[in-house]
Amino acid sequence: MEYRRMGNTGLFLSEISLGTMYYGSYISPAQGIDCLNRAVELGINFIDSADRYGIKDNELDPSAVIPAEVVVGKFLKDHQRTDLVLSTKVHHQLRESPNSGGLGRKHIREQLEISLQNLGTEYVDIYYCHRPDPGTSLEETVRTMTNLIEEGKINYWGTSWWPPYLIERAIGIAKLIGAVAPVVEQPPYHLRARFIEPDLFKVVNHHHLGLTPFEGLSSGLFTGKYNDAIPEDARLKKLQMVDEGFFAQIQPKLQQMEELAATTERTMYQLALAWVLSHEEITSTITGARLPEQVEMNTSASGMQLESETIRQLEEIFVERQPIYHYR
């Protein structure tokens, strides 16, 4: 496993990391802990979670699910906390209350206490604002995150799915009032979603931010299991994210990608994740896994250098997804 510095901070993350979105719901706690244990064995040190994971990202009976943070907390009991980088997130409304949700001081503080209790730790390394909150003063959010850092409850704060202009604005406000600015952003990024390249990459480079994208395998499309047909038990099918019309369009491209992987003696997993990591702006690509074997396949992409011709051919397969640059 190779590690990368998060922006210009002193924190190093494994370039392949493990997300826990469905741990406690579609993925049982036992399965999740097996994956987490294997991840650490393979050198992953960055574990990503969120307050809503396990309880709000599914259609299951609420009595049959538990927060993913609780699963991570159980895993932590058998590991050295200081060796791991833990992140969680805040923003979504999790209970019926006018003050549940958003990025106001009250909700951030109360939800962090719940997250710390779930995780069984005194601090988190990275606390992400899971989405923007247009109804709350950005200065209130910046000051609250700064206070939490000063109190030792979080080490860094960042954003997730924030537009570049808003990240710029948060950094500007932090500088103006002498507060701590966000240092990392977490967007989706893969061969079929490259919209962050024209603007966000520029913000990341200018401010020396970390970038920890997710969905490097395009929600499983780049694993190979969709190359011939949509599996009946596929999560994308259960979530109604793919249908036969979509599959008819994507299948030829997946088969082309499979052929390129075979030609270069790699797997589709490796091509997809190594392509993400080929961009110097990326600190770590957050992957999901239901089985330890999937963790092994994901981590095999660490340190893999793709040839420029391989990158060109990969991007040509998904040429319609290449980003549009608005500036000359």
Image: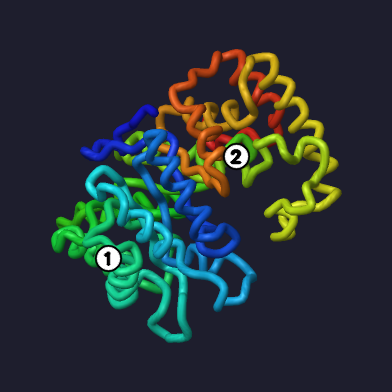
Q: Secondary structure at mark 1?
A: helix
Q: Residues within 10 Å of mark 1 (few under 14, many from 20)?
A: some
Q: Is residue 49 above or below residue 205?
A: below
Name which residue type carries label 2.
Leu
- Residue 105 placement: quadrant: bottom left
Give the distance between the C-alpha atoms of the residues marked 1 and 2, in whole angstroms: 36 Å
Is 108 situated left or right of 189 in this image? left
- In front of the other: label 1 or label 2? 2
Is 258 situated left or right of 67 in this image? right
Is residue 33 visible in the rendered image? The answer is yes
* Tag of residue 217: 2
Q: Is residue 297 above or below residue 131?
A: above
Q: Residue at x 33, y 72 (%)?
A: 114
Q: Residues within 10 Å of mark 2 (few under 14, many from 20)?
A: many
Q: Which residue is mark 1?
A: 139
- Residue 258 placement: quadrant: top right
How many numbered marks appear? 2
Whole-percent x and y of residue 324? Answer: 60, 36
Is residue 283 visible in the rendered image? The answer is no
Is 208 situated left or right of 283 in this image? left
Q: Residue at x 72, y 55 (%)?
A: 241
Name which residue type carries label 1.
Glu
Q: Nearer the viewer, residue 261 or 97?
A: 261
Whole-percent x and y of residue 41? Answer: 39, 37
* Tag of residue 243: none
Mark 1 vs 2, N-terminal side: 1
Q: Residue at x 43, y 86 (%)?
A: 97
Q: Residue at x 22, y 65 (%)?
A: 143
Q: Secondary structure at mark 2?
A: loop
Is 28 situated left or right of 116 in this image? right
